[in-house]
Amino acid sequence: MMKTHKDLIVWQKGIELVKSIYEITDSYPKSEQFGLVSQLRRCSVSIPSNIAEGCGRNSDKELIQFLYIALGSASELETQVIISVELGFLEKNKAESVEILVNEIIKMVSSLIKSIKTRIKD
């Protein structure tokens, strides 16, 4: 049985993603500090944060709601990574490694949602 959100592999991968995004955005131009850098960082932080908040709630329905928010943040992050490449702030190979992790998280969160919905029905 799960003890806390910290036991979830998807949460752990979310933390890994945050660290990666912070490292990558360190090399962005200073002019993007309050633009794309801020957006990328907030989005990445939102993913594990919403997983954690959902796990801390009182019901499966609320957990699912926060997992959907995490999915939205993951999709938003994916878009911002593409924009970063298009603007020349991020190398394609670094973007690809982020996209692989984001897609993995999206699949895991989606599976978790499906699993909870199935459990609710039973």
Image (tube, rainbow, N blue to C red):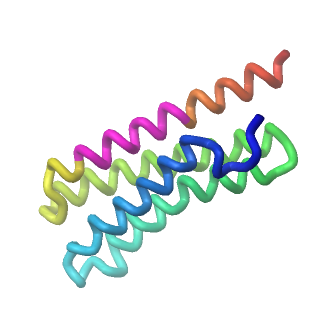
State the quadrant of the N terminus. Answer: top right
Report which quarter residue 116 is drawn in.
top right
In the rendered structure, the answer to whether residue 16 lies left or right of residue 59 reads left
Residue ID at (71%, 56%): 53
Is 101 inside the magenta-drawn segment?
yes
Q: Position of residue 81 (x, y in %)?
A: 29, 54
User: Residue 34 lies in what quarter of the image?
Assistant: bottom left
Between 83 and 19, which is closer to the camera in this rendering?
19
The residue shown at (47%, 40%) is: 105
**Residue 10 placement (x, y as % from top left):** 54, 42
Q: Is residue 101 above or below residue 28?
A: above
Tell me the quarter of the image containing the C terminus. top right
| Residue at horizontal 54 percent and vertical 59 percent from the top | 46
Residue located at (18% from left, 60% from top): 90
Question: Residue at the top extreme?
Answer: 122
Residue 7, quarter of the rendered image: top right
Along the line of sight, the residue nearer the viewer: 93 or 30? 93
The vertical placement of 28 against 81, above or below, is below
**Left or right for 62, reference 58:** left
Q: Is residue 23 above or below residue 31?
A: above
61 sits to left or right of 17: right
- Answer whether residue 79 is magenta in the image: no
Q: Position of residue 72 (x, y in %)?
A: 52, 47
Residue 91 left/right relative to 13? left
Q: Which residues are magenta?
A: 96-108
Observer-nearest of 1 and 29: 1
Residue 30 pos. (x, y %): 23, 83
Farthest residue toward the bottom? 30
Q: Give the prevailing secondary structure in the magenta stretch.
A: helix
